RNA sequence: UGUCCUGUGGUGUAAUUGGCAACACGUCUGACUCUGGAUCAGAAGAGUCCAAGUUCGAGCCUUGGCAGGACAACCA
């Protein structure tokens, strides 16, 4: 089934960044122009936290009639790969955003950055330091203690220039020396204590190959790229707050008129029961704790996509959680609510039995196949109806039957009558067991007058069960997912590795599932609601002979709540 | 012994010239229902980190505390 277009969209509410921008527009800053950028480092797959940033950056520009650039922050060739560039572009597009032809790379600016560094050297604002990393680090001081100046700090401009050229030309080994800005070793802000601008790396770069032996540091690249691209609002996460004075310092050295990009920080997303750091996600992938970056249990965008999340559901989630500077923790339940809300309006309904229990309808003609009409989506009349085959033997869900039902159990039990959805009323007459006392099948009778699901005498039943014909069905594998971690903050424990909290039951594979024949025509990533069970989508592992479904999320279930009381 | 940032129901956000705290998720009732879904109606739950001050009036302003977070990679 193709994706329906009637996605639900939550109105983007105004956040503190929008407020700042509106104030700027009122002041006439940048002539009312708004230009943002999304700057991923291509060293891993995007996750739901990046989705928040993408929605913020693209959404803010859209809101104020501006543009958003995509810029890969590729200043460290030892970590970055083209595979990641491709996945990032796919994910942003899938989320529904477009950067037009404004696809940039920090590496596009390597020449300009080099020239800028030369300018700083000429102005006596940068110098080559021959000390090793450890020494430089020890001279930095601590957050509470000032640093000390490097003995190389006052080299002549000419000497600095010569050495910088030699660095560029590969005349040194990695670690021999670095280029540093000459700012203030006494600054209370660590980042202003003569930060490193360039380091030597003899690693080929995914775009510039072996052209460069020196690469700029993040701080020396990011703000300048913003400046050259005409970015007005450079939105980043809270940990860069202390970098802002340095960001501004570089812009001060660069700017030629009133224009200057402004860095604004917001709190990154933390989701309960998951980890969000790229390093930890990479670890899960590399050590095979999950099947890959797109494992449906991963909080990556590709994982959520494979799990069955829709772009609209992620966008809505992102709008709903808001944007602030408060470092908090969002309940995964809100993410789940967002998919249910969207899928409820759009998903094709079908019937599927995950844990089959055979039912023989003893008074139904053998060999007969009836086609019964079923509604495709009660939330969307336009979705129409389909036919579902009914036969003498059917499967129902094993836990839809109880031999000795408690008070509030409304489903099938000995002697009780229930409705089979879109079919007939049936009454349980016999419970068949094996030698060990396990229930192997049920015998029921049906009321032919209740065809379609209603009895002409107005008789009511308390429950409606989903079912699938024993002979007219598609057998499928269904993968049930639970949270990957059993702890709310798996990486929040100082002495315990986050992997200790991995949930051993996060994946449950059911191979004996029966789905109504309608699903034969479905394609990977198609969304369904298996009635009464939850939302599922077809996994790309499916082959024509074997369909595989992922459970995106369960339906809200008041019965299980009742049970847990 | 520093700099910067943050503190509003269980969670997340709102309260725009100071006017007795709103919304969403979650929770709990009930109605309706051919999905124990959805929908609808309703409830509980904070007096805004603390203290003092200004004011007729403070979540918003002032002062002083307290608590949490970020910063010491040739990572981003």
Image (cartoon, coloured by chain):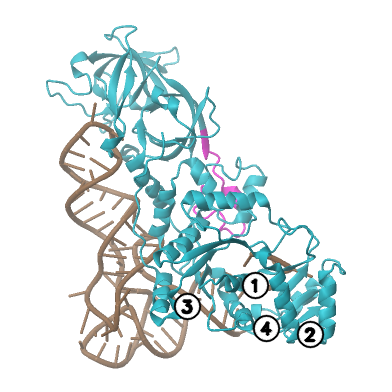
Chain colours: A cyan, B brown
> Magenta stretch: dominant SS?
loop
> Callout 3: helix, strand or loop?
helix
Give how far apart the Cα atoms at labels 3 and 4 are.
Answer: 40 Å
- Mark 3 or mark 4, earlier in chain: 3
Q: Are marks 2 and 4 in contact (CB under 8 Å)?
A: no
What is the crowding at mark 4: few (fewer than 14 residues within 10 Å), some, or many (at least 20)?
few
**Residue A497 included in the magenta stretch of the image:** yes
Q: Are marks 1 and 4 on the same chain?
A: yes
Residue identified by numbered label 3: A30
> Callout 1: helix, strand or loop?
helix
Q: Which chain carries label 1?
A: A
**Residue A390 included in the magenta stretch of the image:** no
Identify the mark at residue A219; answer none if there is no mark.
1
Up the image or down, B24 lies above or below A141; here it is: above
Q: Position of residue A271 (x, y in %)?
A: 48, 55
Up the image or down, A36 lies above or below A145; here it is: above
Q: Do the residues labelled 3 and 4 touch (CB within 8 Å)?
A: no
Chain part drawn in magenta:
A486-508
Disc tally is 4
Residue identified by numbered label 2: A153
Residue at horizontal 33%, vertical 24%? A401
Identify the mark at residue A145; answer none if there is no mark.
4
- Mark 3 or mark 1, earlier in chain: 3
Q: Nearer the viewer, mark 3 or mark 1?
A: 3
Q: Are marks 2 and 1 on the same chain?
A: yes
What is the crowding at mark 1: few (fewer than 14 residues within 10 Å), some, or many (at least 20)?
some
> Callout 2: helix, strand or loop?
loop
Quadrant hosting residue A147 = bottom right
Residue at horizontal 65%, vertical 65%? A106
């Amino acid at each position: 089934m193709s994706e329906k277009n009637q996605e639900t969209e939550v109105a983007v509410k105004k956040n503190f960044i929008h407020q700042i921008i509106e104030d700027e527009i009122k002041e006439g800053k940048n002539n009312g122009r708004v230009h943002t950028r999304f700057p991923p480092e291509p060293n891993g797959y995007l996750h739901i936290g990046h989705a928040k940033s993408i929605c913020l950056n693209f959404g803010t520009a859209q809101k104020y009639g501006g543009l958003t650039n995509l810029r890969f922050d590729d200043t460290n060739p030892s970590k970055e790969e083209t595979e990641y560039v491709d996945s990032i572009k796919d994910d942003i597009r899938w989320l529904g955003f477009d950067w037009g032809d404004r696809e940039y790379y920090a590496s596009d600016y390597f020449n300009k950055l080099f020239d800028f560094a030369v300018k700083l050297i000429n102005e006596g604002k940068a110098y080559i330091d021959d000390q090793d990393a450890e020494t430089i680090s020890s001279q930095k001081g601590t957050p509470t203690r000032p640093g000390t100046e490097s003995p190389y700090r006052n080299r002549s401009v000419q000497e600095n220039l010569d050495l910088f050229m030699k660095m560029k030309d590969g005349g040194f080994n990695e670690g021999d020396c670095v280029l540093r800005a000459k700012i203030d070793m006494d600054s209370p802000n660590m980042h202003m204590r003569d930060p490193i601008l360039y380091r030597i790396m003899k690693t080929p770069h995914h775009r510039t190959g072996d052209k460069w032996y020196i690469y700029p540091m993040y701080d020396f690249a990011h703000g300048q790229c913003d400046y050259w691209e005409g970015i007005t609002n450079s939105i980043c996460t809270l940990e860069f707050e202390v970098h802002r004075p340095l960001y501004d310092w570089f812009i001060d050295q660069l700017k030629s008129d009133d224009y200057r990009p402004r860095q604004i920080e917001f709190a990154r997303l933390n989701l309960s029961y998951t980890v969000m750091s790229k390093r930890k996600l990479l670890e899960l992938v590399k050590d095979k704790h999950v099947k890959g970056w797109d494992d449906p249990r991963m909080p990556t965008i590709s994982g959520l996509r494979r799990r069955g999340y829709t772009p609209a559901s992620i966008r809505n989630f992102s709008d709903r959680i808001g944007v602030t500077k408060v470092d908090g923790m969002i309940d995964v339940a809100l993410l789940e609510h967002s998919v249910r809300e969207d899928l409820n309006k759009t998903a094709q309904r079908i019937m599927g039995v995950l844990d089959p229990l055979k039912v023989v309808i003893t008074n139904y003609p053998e060999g007969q196949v009836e086609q019964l009409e079923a509604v495709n989506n009660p939330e969307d009349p336009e979705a129409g109806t389909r036919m579902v085959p009914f036969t003498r033997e059917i499967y129902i869900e094993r836990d839809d039957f109880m031999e000795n039902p408690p008070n509030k159990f409304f489903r099938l039990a000995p002697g009780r009558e229930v409705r089979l959805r879109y079919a007939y009323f049936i009454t349980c007459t016999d419970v068949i067991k094996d030698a060990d006392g396990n229930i192997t099948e049920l015998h029921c009778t049906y009321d032919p007058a209740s065809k379609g699901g209603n009895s002409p005498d107005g008789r009511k039943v308390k429950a409606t069960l989903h079912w699938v014909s024993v002979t007219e069905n598609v057998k499928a594998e269904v993968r049930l997912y639970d949270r990957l971690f059993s702890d709310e903050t798996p990486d929040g424990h100082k002495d315990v590795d986050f992997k200790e909290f991995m949930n051993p039951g996060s994946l449950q594979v059911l191979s004996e599932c029966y789905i109504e024949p309608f699903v034969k025509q479905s394609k990977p990533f198609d969304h369904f609601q298996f009635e009464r069970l939850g939302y599922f989508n077809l996994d790309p592992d499916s082959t024509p002979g074997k369909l595989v479904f992922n459970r995106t999320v369960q339906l809200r279930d008041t019965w299980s709540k009742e049970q847990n009381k």
